[in-house]
Amino acid sequence: MSIQEAALYGDLVVALRDYAAGQLACVSPDLDAETAGGRLDEFIRTWFFTPQGELYGSAPREVIWREQLGEGNPIPREYAAEAYGDCDCPICQMMREEIENAESDEAHGHFWNYFPDSCLLDRYDPEGSEERWRQELAEMQEWQVEREAERNKSQDAAPGYAPVPLSGQEVDAATFLSVLQRPWLDPELHRAAQQLVDHCDVPLTSATGGLSYRRITLAEALSLIAGLNGQGMDAKALLAQIDAWPYENVALDWLTEPEKVLAAVEWAMNGGSPQGRDADATRFRHHRDFILALAQLMSPAARLWMSGWLEAVRYAGMAGGGGVPVPA
């Protein structure tokens, strides 16, 4: 609403008050125009001072004075559910909690403005309203056409460009894994790498898409333990869990996809397959507890790094490398 529109609405209220007072005086012999005008003034004053639900409990006078003083309209805490309660998105629920937990209505920083979908003139002058929106839409479409023409002109005037081809060899998986061993690790991490070789398997993806496993090589184990150590993982704690594992093999993708593996274990424990109903429930519990313990050791950064490491190992296997040779 424009300033002129608001001012003219105020003039309209006064004119309507004077007109109504004169009409009341004509139909009521015991009521003169001044007395009738006083009653209408009281009605108008009461309207200004009465809180309204669509104004979040504020009276019209409060909204008007706050705007003229350059202040906002804070959402009261008792209206937080009405303002954001119908939306299930986490952000809206967070804003609702901020309002409800704030020390005061002004402290939470959430405000509203009164913007009706239409104005009073739309109701009494629908032809003028339609013409106004028609003109505004035409101006918007004209602006969009001009902007599109400027964009096309800019693209046509742009100089040609082709990136210079990069030189040098691509880094293959074997090189990637071998570089991760440098500088050479201390003896403790070398022993840890050997322990991984004795227990751990890495997944391989065949050309047909099937999944199989093979034992990790020493070179791969050295690169793995170096990378995990660099990501802040406690190698001793990892090896302690592996030592406590009562079975022969540990699949290393358990560390990067614990949720997926746990879902499969829970499914099997609950008899999700004919094999699962006859399997040893204790063994399934052991797998579940072991994977949960590994998941607690892996930080998000370590898990992300190891996901890339496993992809490199899979790539090496598909390329026919079958692992990375131990440097001489």
Image (cartoon, rainbow, N blue to C red):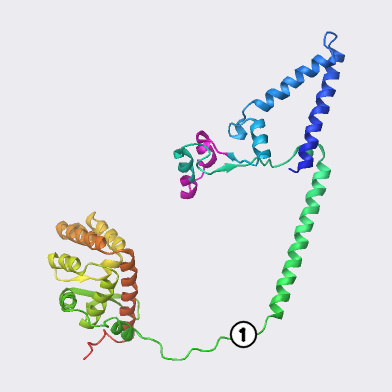
Query: Farthest front residue?
Result: 69
Query: Quarter-wise, where is residue 111 in the image?
Result: top right
Provide residue 106's location: percent of width, then percent of height: 53, 39
Magenta extent: 74-94
Provide residue 93's location: percent of width, then percent of height: 47, 45
The residue drawn where x is 50% and y is 47% is: 92
In this view, the residue in front, 122 or 42, is 42
Q: In the shown orientation, is residue 298 left or right of residue 84? A: left
Q: In the shown orientation, is residue 286 left or right of residue 130? A: left
- Magenta-colored stretch includes residue 23: no
Q: In the shown orientation, is residue 90 left or right of residue 226? A: right
The residue drawn where x is 16% and y is 79% is: 187
The residue drawn where x is 22% and y is 67% is: 234
Q: Is residue 54 above or below residue 239?
A: above
Quadrant the C terminus occupies: bottom left
Q: Read off the residue under disc 1.
A: 161
Provide residue 30's location: percent of width, then percent of height: 83, 8
Q: Secondary structure at mark 1?
A: loop
Provide residue 210's location: percent of width, then percent of height: 31, 75
Q: In the shown orientation, is residue 230 left or right of residue 135? A: left
Neighbor class of circle 1 (other Cα within 10 Å; few <14, some 14-19, many 20+) is few
In this view, the residue in front, 155 or 110, is 110
Query: Quarter-wise, where is residue 258 in the image?
Result: bottom left
Q: Is residue 128 above or below residue 288?
A: above
Q: Amino acid at mark 1?
A: Tyr
Quadrant the N terminus occupies: top right
Query: Quarter-wise, where is residue 257 in the image?
Result: bottom left
Query: Farthest right residue?
Result: 26
* Main SS class of the magenta portion in the image: helix
The residue drawn where x is 79% and y is 39% is: 121
Q: Is residue 322 above or below residue 295?
A: below
In this view, the residue in front, 145 or 192, is 192
